[in-house]
Amino acid sequence: MAEKSEWRCPDCDAVLEVSTVRGLRFEQCPRCSGVLLDKQEVVSFVRSAVPRESVENSPIELDRQVIKTFSLATSHRCPRDGTQFEIINYAYDSNILLERCPSCEVLWIKQNQLSALAQFLKGNPKLKQLGLLLSQDIADNSSSSEMAHPPPFIRLTTFPVPVSDFVDRLDTPYVVMAIIALNCIIFLLQYVSPNPEFLLNLFSYHPSESLFSLTRLLSHQFLHLNLLHVVSNMWVLWIFGDNVESRLGHAKFLAFYLISGAIAALGFGALLPHSDLYLLGASGSIAAVIGAYVYLYPKEKLQVLFWNTLYRWTVWKFVALWMGAQFLGWLFDLMSAESITIAHGVHVIGFFFGLLVVALLARVRKGLIQHVDVYQS
């Protein structure tokens, strides 16, 4: 007699049964044959459950359109913790749509999806050979002089730059887009202004003059010193902010963003209350967004440009390196407070404030970090 699980099938509500295939334990529905698997078990399970000799090669579809899942929804809930499932495109471009719990990351796989997964995982030898020939052709036609002298922007990437993440956007990040647009407009006004220093002096944050100025604690977040400053900040906000906004909701995200920037600046100012420094930029707010992202998506990966090469890193690997640099920079800042050019302390305070706030929201009231409307069918 099969061992009964404590969970029920999200499709037909039958009690799941615990099964084993080649030493791998999993929960399966005896009625519809759906399977509940942890994220890291999918490949092993599919290759064990579906005989390789019965699987056809994956078709070569050069004009295949990748299905975007941010507009798709399901009414099913995770059997383990009751969280609303989200729909994902497995491996981001397979067009095999699975249901995943955003909380525990367990996957629900229907019986008719197993063969498609097996075919996708098997791949196609012809496609692999085509890829090898293409990469060899590119290498043969690339001049060594071009590789020896990369563009100036690429030469700047001796520190990791996030290029993209792999989390499906759940809905349109209106607040993030509005913040980016507003920052760009204000920077343009600074650029065309006959007296940009007047604007900087008027709206930047001066700890020594007005430590608790609410106006300046908010307004300094929308000022930037130069083009690289505003572009780098807005780029990082776009990479991390859309998914955080999806989980918090538009209004909560806006409040979180503004309050985090103010707290980061206030904390920095409190440590250097007599400094003549002027603080400006969205770095504190964006550092808080990164902290929130780390809590909400701790197992996700980022595409990172580092030393002229693209890597796929876990978000924790990127943050560990980034935060290490911020702590080191902050130490030097405190040793030479009057010559600070980058407020590393704002980044550190903002990151941990964002991480702590979202963690507390998740514990106090789970609904505060779930954009429920997105998941409802």
Image (cartoon, grey):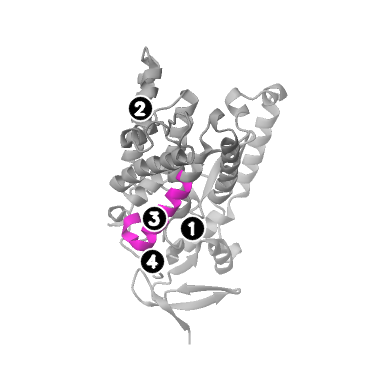
| Image location (x, y in percent) of residue 74 | 32, 58
Q: CB under 8 Å between callouts 1 and 4?
A: no
Q: CB under 8 Å between callouts 3 and 2?
A: no
Q: CB under 8 Å between callouts 1 and 2?
A: no
- Rendered position, 173 above or below 247: above
Q: CB under 8 Å between callouts 1 and 3?
A: no
C-alpha gap between disc 1 and disc 3: 16 Å
Q: Residues within 10 Å of mark 4 (few under 14, many from 20)?
A: many
Give the mark nearest the N terminus, 3 or 2: 3
Q: Where does label 1 land, which residue?
A: 116
Q: Nearer the viewer, residue 158 or 16?
A: 158
Q: Residue 83 sits in which quadrant? A: bottom left
Q: Where does label 3 land, which residue?
A: 87
Label annotation for residue 245 = none
Give the mark nearest the N terminus, 2 or 4: 4
Give the mark nearest the N terminus, 1 or 3: 3
Q: What's the residue type where badge 3 is placed?
A: Ile
Magenta stretch bounds: 350-369
Q: Where does label 2 land, which residue?
A: 203
Q: Where does label 4 land, which residue?
A: 78
| Image location (x, y in percent) of residue 77 | 35, 65
Give the mark nearest the N terminus, 1 or 2: 1
Q: What's the residue type where badge 1 is placed?
A: Ala
Describe residue 227's horizontal placement relative to residue 220 as left or right.
right
